[in-house]
Image (spheres, helix red, strand yellow):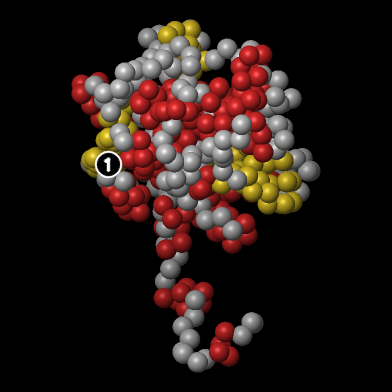
Amino acid sequence: MAEPCRLTTDRADCVACGRPQPLPAGAAVCDCGRRENLAVRYPLDPARRAALLAAVAAGERSLWRYAPLLPVGARHASRLQVGWTPLIDCGEVEGVRLHLKDETRNPSGSLKDRASEVVVAVAAARGVERVVVASTGNAAASLACIAASAGLTAVILVPQTVPQAKLAQILAYGATVYRVAGSYDDAFALVETASERLGLFNRSTGLNPFTREGKKTVALEIAEQLGWQAPDWVIVPTGDGNILSAVWKGFRELAALGLIARTPRLVAAQSAASPAIARAHGAHPLLPPPDAAETTVADSITVDRPRDGTAALQALAESDGLAVEVDDEAIVAGVGEAAARFGLFVEPSGGAAVAAFRRLARAGLFERNQRVVCLATGSGLKDLRPILGAVTPEWLDRRAPLVRPGDWQSIAPS
């Protein structure tokens, strides 16, 4: 085992009580009565700003271009390129300038690679060899992928309902996998117990403060790709709330360093079958919740108990943000629109962001010519149900008619 290395900061704050405390070795909560998650803190001073700008100028094409705002240095990075994904300008849509942040380009096909890259780097810096996670699928595939590249062992717990494409991906990376006979929340609780009893390094969302550090780099990239300006809105597919809190942390740190003049308004896009954060935040009068649903195709944002809910709600409040619920019909339509109109095949969580964008636009909540960014958090190849669910023989005959060899007349433009 390698000799443990120091991190770039030793500070953390409780997201609930705000009490400063030493940065933990891994997953931890504050010992205040609320037992809430911790947030990593850095001195956001002129020296940090200068170091960040110098690192960016060096031209590294991954999230490690922002190493001065990360808890560990790039020498502990995996061999993969994580981050520095395209910000796709979709032009004028519904009177605003729409951008899609294409996180499908990450090594395992999702934004969760950002979290796993930093968590695995911290584990490597501390001489840890085994990392465990509970996941609906994306974080598991991500950890399995990054750990394989870094030479660490990934231990994965997923609910038994995990989509087959995601399970196949996790297994392909050689991870140790357990399917839990229950929900994501059951898997999360089991990982908490196992990590404490067996001494495993727990990557699970929220509990491990370094997941937020990796995910916040998507905000840093968006600002840089827009010429060190924040967009007016960022729409975030939301389940546990960790991406939402991370995006807000990233923009706030840039503002504190004087690199952006203002911060954006955030939108939590939630499935109507899993709207805990939206219900806690409250609906805008122009965005009433759709009918409740018991299940959803958007498994990656399906949680009963958001594991970073407090920080997510703070992000919405501080950014003057909104929470939007969308049903499966709208989510599936969002997947189709992102693919057929913008050429980006996203999983249902990304479809939820597009569906939320449509709801906000049609409610008149955007001002003309504002810039809106939707996070396309994962590849559509991870979950084909939105497409395959529509496939019947009649639909297939209509969308992909069968022609005979030599029948060139049938393929003439209609």
Residue 148 image position (x, y, % from top left): 33, 40
Q: Position of residue 8 (x, y in %)?
A: 48, 16
Q: Quadrant of the C terminus?
A: bottom right
Position of residue 89 measured from the top left corner of the image (x, y, whole percent): 68, 49
Circle 1 packing at 10 Å, graded few (<14), some (14-19), many (20+), is many
Residue picked out by circle 1: 175
Residue sitting at x 57%, y 31%: 65
The residue furthest left is: 198
Residue 181 vs residue 86: left or right? left
Res. 209 image quadrant: top left
> In x, y percent, where is residue 342?
62, 57
In the rendered image of this protein, does residue 267 appear above or below residue 43? below
Q: Quadrant of the N terminus?
A: top left
Question: As rendered, which of 195 and 174 lies closer to the eye?
Answer: 174
* Callout 1 amino acid: Ala
Q: Quadrant of residue 235?
A: top right
**In the image, is 323 to the left or to the right of 120?**
right
Depth order, front residue of 291/64? 64
In the image, residue 377 above or below residue 152: below
The residue drawn where x is 27% and y is 41% is 175
Say which residue appears at 72% left-offset and 32% top-offset. Answer: 229
Residue occupying the point 48% across, 11% down = 11
